[in-house]
Image: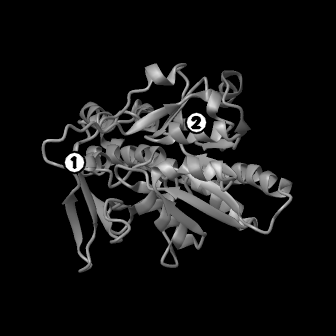
Amino acid sequence: MNIHGKHYQSIWFDENDCNVKIIDQTRLPHRFEVLALSSLQDACHAIESMQVRGAPLIGVTAAYGMYLALREDPNQLAVALDRLASTRPTAVNLQWALNRVSAALRNTVVEERAASALQQAQAMAAEDSAICEAIGDNGAKLLQEIWDARPDQSKPLNVLTHCNAGALAAVDWGTALSVIYKTAAAGVPLHVWVGETRPRNQGASLTCWELAQQGIDHTLIVDNAGGHLMQQGLVDCCVVGSDRTTITGDVCNKIGTYLKALAAFDNQIPFYVALPVSSIDFSLTDGAKGIPIEERGAEEISHFIGLNDNDEVQRVRLCAEDVAISNYGFDVTPARLVSKIITEKGVCAAEQSQLQKLRV
């Protein structure tokens, strides 16, 4: 990912101080800060507080968290697995990553557990970057087809996205934004509609910031404007990410995704979902009933964090103190509303017969 002309990953191991470094996403877009994680507690806090977020990045952070835990005490394997598994319930990559590290340590002597966990985490980070780049390559072909079929190419291809499924949600490249980055690199003129993505405004704070760093034309909109834009013919396709996808093609993504998919379906606009195979829960057939939906704190809705006129980051209340608040973090889009699923292994329909093949 390009940041102020320099390449960064969202997470990396610093060989100089032997700590894990992350970009603190709770400080963006107003402040760019790099944090060091040096303990299991640091890694858990980073995930729970959303200093890191996005299914692929959560998984890799959990793997690095295992290394940090075993460096502290190589005998706390079970404790570390349980603690990290409890940080966030929805993204399947979290448990996938922990299972992978646990399997690698099964026949490892106690003294070598930390080194083995670090090796696994670094390998997963490298793989994630390559996987996300491949997702971008595969998805760019779909957008290229839409562009080539357009009789009028005097205006850019308009893509609508929701939340942040960019490099900040992964180690690098991202999922949905990787498709956009690769399409732009192929020479297709693009414009991206970015939903603000309440309550944490990750579209406004993170996606707009990423696209600006890459020099890609974009416009921030309120979440409920997406349907209007589609009715007016101002959206050519939608591309979003996924935190967990069922074997039948139901997609769980940031709250509000379902409404975008309904509007796209009603206006016959392609609705694409970009995700790594590791985000597919092959044990689930019904997303609405089987995917645990995270409920987060009321303060994410009752308060807003922004920059005041004195260039100071400030937290302000939006509603009365006695307002009852419900804060669901995700919703489930049924497979019937998904046009195509884009993975590192290719593009397929949101159908069990197609997704099952990706398990091999």
Which mark sits nearer the N-terminus, 2 or 1? 2
Residue under label 2, please give it: 262
Q: Nearer the viewer, residue 87 or 71?
A: 87
Q: Residues within 10 Å of mark 2 (few under 14, many from 20)?
A: some
Instruction: Let me know if residue 332 appears in the view.
Output: yes
Instruction: Let me know if residue 127 appears in the view.
Output: no
- Choose top left, top right, bottom left or bottom right for residue 345: top right
Task: Residue 35 in the image: state x and y as whole percent.
Answer: 30, 64
| Total residue callouts | 2
Q: In this view, which residue lies farthest toward the left?
A: 322
Task: Residue 175 in the image: state x and y as whole percent.
Answer: 57, 50
Q: Is residue 169 left or right of residue 357?
A: left
Q: What residue do we see at 29% from left, 34% from top?
A: 86
Q: Is residue 258 above or below residue 33?
A: above
Q: Is residue 292 above or below residue 49?
A: above
Q: Nearer the viewer, residue 265 or 17?
A: 265
Residue under label 1, please give it: 299
Q: Amino acid at mark 2?
A: Leu
